[in-house]
Image (cartoon, rainbow, N blue to C red):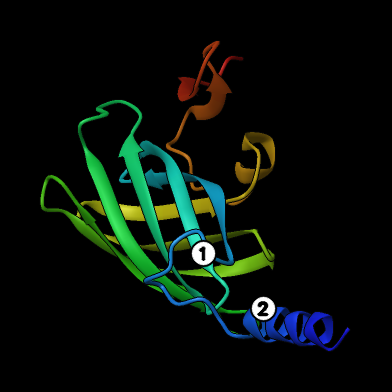
């Protein structure tokens, strides 16, 4: 019986210690990212860790070879901030607000223009937080999210 109590205590202590950024998957969560960078749609994923650190990877929907990766830090009280570096040498700095543990939205300064994004939100809800190009809306083309012309 004493061994059982020690095992439970060890498990609880293990859960109380924050996961480090060097331990991907351990006490982390992923969320879909929808971003508009310089009027172009980017899609991808962010992974956040219990200690508030995280990474993200997105790609241009129009030009899939254009990829961006970055890191961020966050807290429930202050929101978060981060940096993004793209394969075409462009970059961005951004800030965001949590709407819950696994969802939120933000904006930033991209070297080629404005940046807005959401994470953990479905497209209809994400659109409220995105600065879409004039005359465009988010829609599914049958298999993936894309920017399409607004219809009258």
Q: Residue furthest top?
A: 142
Give the number of marks.
2
- Residue at image position (69%, 43%) is 125
Residue identifier under label 1: 48
Image spot of residue 113 (x, y percent): 27, 53
- Say which quadrant the C terminus sits in: top right
Q: Nearer the viewer, residue 134 or 6?
A: 6
Image spot of residue 96 (x, y percent): 52, 68
Please, is residue 100 above or below residue 15 in the view? above
Q: Is residue 39 left or right of residue 46?
A: left
Identify the mark at residue 127; answer none if there is no mark: none
**Marks 2 and 1, how far apart at CA:** 16 Å
- Residue at image position (62%, 49%) is 120
Local SS, label 1: strand
- Residue at image position (78%, 80%) is 8
- Residue at image position (20%, 31%) is 65
Image spot of residue 151 (x, y percent): 58, 15
Please, is residue 143 above or below residue 84 in the view? above
Q: Nearer the viewer, residue 12 or 58?
A: 12
User: Which of the two marks, 2 or 1, is nearer to us in this view?
Assistant: 2
Residue identifier under label 2: 15
Q: Nearer the viewer, residue 8 or 38?
A: 8
Q: Is residue 88 left or right of residue 47?
A: left
Q: Is residue 7 left or right of residue 54?
A: right
């Amino acid at each position: 019986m004493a061994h059982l109590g020690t095992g439970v205590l060890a498990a609880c202590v293990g859960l109380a210690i924050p996961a480090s950024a060097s331990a991907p998957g351990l006490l982390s969560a992923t969320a879909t990212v929808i971003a508009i960078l310089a009027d172009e749609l980017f899609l991808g994923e962010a992974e956040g860790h219990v200690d508030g650190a995280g990474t993200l990877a997105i790609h241009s929907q129009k030009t899939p070879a254009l990829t961006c990766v970055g890191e961020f830090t966050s807290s429930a009280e202050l929101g978060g901030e981060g940096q993004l570096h793209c394969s075409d040498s462009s970059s961005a700095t951004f800030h965001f607000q949590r709407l819950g543990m696994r969802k939120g939205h933000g904006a930033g300064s991209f070297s080629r223009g404005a940046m807005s994004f959401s994470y953990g939100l479905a497209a209809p809800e994400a659109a409220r937080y995105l600065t879409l190009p004039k005359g465009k809306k988010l829609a599914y083309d049958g298999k993936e999210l894309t920017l399409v012309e607004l219809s009258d």
